[in-house]
Image (cartoon, rainbow, N blue to C red):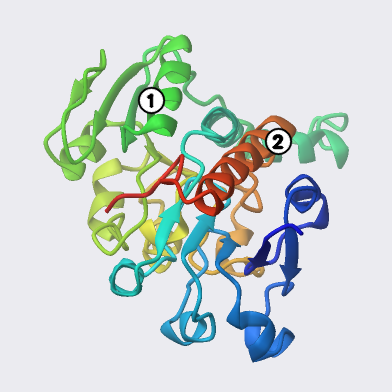
Amino acid sequence: MPEQVLIYSRFPKAQLVRIGEHYDLLDGMGKPPIETFSAAELASVRALITAGGQGLSPAVLDSLPSLGAIICYGTGYDGVNFDETKKRGIVVGNSPAANAASVADLAMTLMLATTRRLLPADAYVRDGRWFNKQPSPLMRPQPGMTGRKIGVYGMGEIGRKIAVRCAAFETEVAYYSRSKHDVPYAYHSSLASLAEWADILMVAVRAGADTKHVINADILKLLGPQGTIVNISRGSVIDEKALVAALENNVIAGAGLDVYETEPHAPDALTKFPTVVLTPHVGGHTIESHVAMQSCVLANLDAFFAGKALRYPVNV
């Protein structure tokens, strides 16, 4: 009989089919487990699958007395309380680099769509203003990519792939991260220095307490009135109120966002700017990425239930 695995976060059923071929899945559809399953059913659960950004409270862990492994579907694990997992002897795994190429591709898409005013241009054709030769301030020429200064904040797998793609567009690339890396890009010793230098700031840093709202009003001011920010990491990294104010006051030129402080993101002031391009956290949402992430999840589960070390452990 296959081992039972709790599905803690809400996932589309299609993403669970392959995993369900190997394990008996208890799918709580995103609700607290104790609301969906009895205490007796949860008592024997030894592993769960979660979206890395969703919080796992001590109360949830208390309802799973046999839990030994938390497996994150994706690269992120910022929702995991590692003080609690270490205290309880729970191992944590993720899917490192499984979706890096797809996320980097979307970062480039957001950058180009924002800087080339793709959404206003699309609307200009659709609503007949182009045909009727009506002028539009948003259709004024914008700087191209050649020679643009692109700062990459975070030089992990995704940051590296973004940098490579940016370099192919004949741009100048530099980066800031907690430490220097063996990469062919100039290193800045602070985020402030990178923002002041860059025309476009690509946010690819891992979320955590040390990066919450690190992109604030001061950093946006340094980016400048011709600057663009693109975020494909976690919404918590940017102070959204400061971002809205910066856009309203032309402190920066535009933004491309795939992630938000609160998701799903409801229509608000941020969604009203024509120079902002928004996508619903779909950076890693490609067929290839999901296959790769599912392979990592299965490898971690197989190792755990075999009494072995996780194939892709998170060590913090």
Could you tell whether 70 is left or right of 280 in the image? left
Q: Quadrant of residue 160?
A: top left
Q: Quadrant of residue 247?
A: bottom left
Q: Quadrant of residue 146?
A: top left
Give the residue at x 58% y 46%: 302
Where is residue 171 shown, x and y percent of the image? 39, 15
Could you tell whether 165 is left or right of 193 in the image? right
Where is residue 239 shown, x and y percent of the image? 37, 63
Q: Which mark is residue 88?
A: none
**Residue sitting farthest toward the left:** 189
Q: Amino acid at mark 1?
A: Arg
Q: In which quadrant will I find the N terminus?
A: bottom right
Label 1: element kind: helix
Is 76 drawn above or below residue 80 in the view shown?
A: above
Q: Amino acid at mark 2?
A: Thr
Q: Which mark is residue 160?
A: 1
Give the residue at x 66% y 68%: 267
Where is residue 183 shown, x and y percent of the image? 26, 17
Q: Does residue 283 appear anywhere in the picture?
A: no
Is 308 drawn above or below residue 105 in the view shown?
A: below
Is 61 drawn above or below residue 311 in the view shown?
A: below
| Relative depth, front residue between 233 and 229 | 233
| Relative depth, front residue between 21 and 135 | 21
Q: Earlier in the sequence, mark 1 or mark 2?
A: 1
Q: State the CA–CA distance, disc 1 to disc 2.
A: 19 Å
Q: Which residue is mark 2?
A: 286
Could you tell whether 132 is left or right of 269 in the image? right
